[in-house]
Image (cartoon, rainbow, N blue to C red):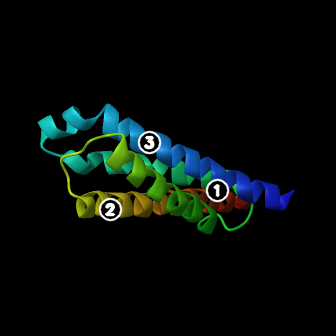
């Protein structure tokens, strides 16, 4: 059962990472450009990391990171083939590496918050 929960975390992070990436590329392109803060959308990648960390029983940081690293090449191929971007390959690669970082940070934030909640419940 533990190994199944591990794969659930990886698969969940893989799917959510691709969904967030496509959502940001399709729907939010103009909104962040108009405000002058184009890369605020990277903060949305915290969500897949936190959700995947919640679904993982052990290795709550490593499994979301693996899922995000597996999804990054898929997103890169989608961005280069399906969505025609005006950015270079290196800019898109840097953007995806930043997205992987924010996904891992989401897993760390979930781990921190769950540790705080456990500590507070232990005091009562």
Mark number displayed over residue 10: 1
Residue 51 visible, this angle: no
Q: How many marks?
A: 3
Q: Say if 9 sits above or below 15 in the image.
A: below
Residue in the image at 40% along x and 46% along y: 78
Nearest the eye: 66 or 108 = 66
Residue 67 coordinates in the image, percent (x, y): 58, 58
Residue 120 visible, this angle: yes
Cα distance in 3D space between marks 1 and 3 = 15 Å
Residue 25 coordinates in the image, percent (x, y): 32, 40
* Mark 3 surroundings within 10 Å by alpha-carbon count, few (fewer than 14), some (14 through 19), many (20 or more): some
* Mark 2 surroundings within 10 Å by alpha-carbon count, few (fewer than 14), some (14 through 19), many (20 or more): some
Mark number displayed over residue 93: 2
Residue in the image at 52% along x and 49% along y: 48
Snapshot quadrant of residue 94? bottom left
Q: Secondary structure at mark 3?
A: helix
Mark number displayed over residue 20: 3
Snapshot quadrant of residue 98? bottom left
Residue at far front of view: 81
Nearest the eye: 91 or 81 = 81
Residue 17 coordinates in the image, percent (x, y): 49, 48
**Quarter of the figure that contains the C terminus:** bottom right
Cα distance in 3D space between marks 1 and 2 = 21 Å
């Amino acid at each position: 059962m533990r190994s199944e929960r591990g794969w659930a975390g990886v698969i969940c992070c893989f799917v959510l990472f691709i969904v967030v990436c496509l959502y940001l590329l399709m729907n939010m392109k103009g909104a962040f450009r108009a405000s002058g803060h184009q890369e605020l959308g990277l903060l949305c990648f915290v969500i897949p990391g936190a959700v995947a960390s919640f679904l993982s029983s052990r290795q709550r940081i490593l499994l979301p990171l693996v899922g995000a690293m597996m999804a990054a090449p898929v997103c890169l191929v989608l961005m280069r083939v399906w969505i025609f971007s005006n950015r270079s390959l290196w800019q898109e690669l840097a953007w995806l590496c930043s997205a992987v970082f924010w996904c891992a940070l989401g897993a760390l934030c979930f781990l921190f918050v769950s540790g705080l909640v456990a500590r507070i419940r232990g005091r009562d």
